[in-house]
Image (tube, rainbow, N blue to C red):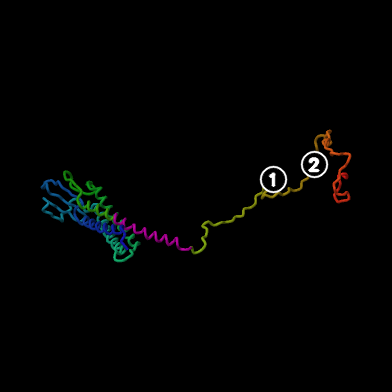
Amino acid sequence: MRTPVVMTLGMVFAPCGLLLNLTGTLAPGWRLVKGFLNQPVDVELYQGLWDMCREQSSRERECGQTDQWGYFEAQPVLVARALMVTSLAATVLGLLLASLGVRCWHDEPNFVLAGLSGVVLFVAGLLSLIPVSWYNHFLGDRDVLPAPASPVTVQVSYSLVLGYLGSCLLLLGGFSLALSFAPWCEERCRRRRKAPSAGPRRSSVSTIQVEWPEPDLAPAIKYYSDGQHRPPPAQHRKPKPKVGFPMPRPRPKAYTNSVDVLDGEGWESQDAPSCSTHPCDSSLPCDSDL
């Protein structure tokens, strides 16, 4: 299997970040102090986390200078020492996990180890970025980071720049390797969908039946509740007297028509009644019998 791009980027950025942070931690170049009185103009003092170096004309460099202002006892310097060393150790651990997780010599990489190494490298980048940013924030504050009084000037030196670059590379490399969790999570979700359920799913909401006492209802509600009509109990009620007088009912009327509607519809010959060709003793009646 071809190595994923995110793993390749992580394996490139992480060693570069480790090299830059290691150089920035050991090199005496976190702060540049120059402009000393009663000394040559080109005299410069480089202050780091572990040592101070005096340089003149970019040719003579003397390290191991005496700390006359209590610089190494300042809180930003002590915190930077601890965090930078911790960041270097975490970076080495992350690279070891990344080497075991990527496994370029095998067909399938271990996505879990690769993603875990990305998380470790990302944390290492944060551990190195915090002291570098804090030191840079108090760079010109002589109360926090002691330095000679004016006209001596303080400036940022190369170790801070290397620390910033190394921290950013570790953050990018750790983030790239942490994306290796995506294929592993996708495969795990796919297995969960395909796996059959062990049994019927139980409802998460439990039903509790509570029997409440029946309240005393009014008679109108009591005898018509539950959709049933119950006759009320027998009560001795007096019949209401009828009010008014009885009215006589009218007789039914019948409709009579004075015109004979059958007038003019007689037979053609009333004198000689016609009879059918069949004899009268047949089963059919004659016209004269009608």
Q: Nearer the viewer, residue 67 or 171?
A: 171
In this rendering, would 224 be left or right of 280? left
Q: Nearer the viewer, residue 13 or 146?
A: 13
Residue type indicated by callout 2 = Pro
Q: Does residue 224 appear anywhere in the picture? A: yes
Q: Nearer the viewer, residue 74 or 21?
A: 21
In this rendering, would 176 be left or right of 230? left
Q: Nearer the viewer, residue 195 or 163?
A: 195
Mark 2 or mark 1: whose residue is earlier in sequence:
1
User: In this figure, which residue is indicated by the disc labeled 1?
Assistant: 220
Percent position of residue 215, x then y: 65, 50
Percent position of residue 280, x then y: 88, 49
Percent position of residue 93, x then y: 29, 62
**In the picture, which quadrant includes the N terminus?**
bottom left
Residue type indicated by callout 1 = Ala
Q: Residues within 10 Å of mark 1 (few under 14, many from 20)?
A: few
Percent position of residue 49, x then y: 21, 55
In this rendering, would 61 be left or right of 9? left
Name the residue: 37% across, 59% down.
183
Magenta region, residue range: 171-196
Taken as a whole, is the magenta stretch helix, strand or loop?
A: helix
Which labelled disc corresponds to residue 239?
A: 2
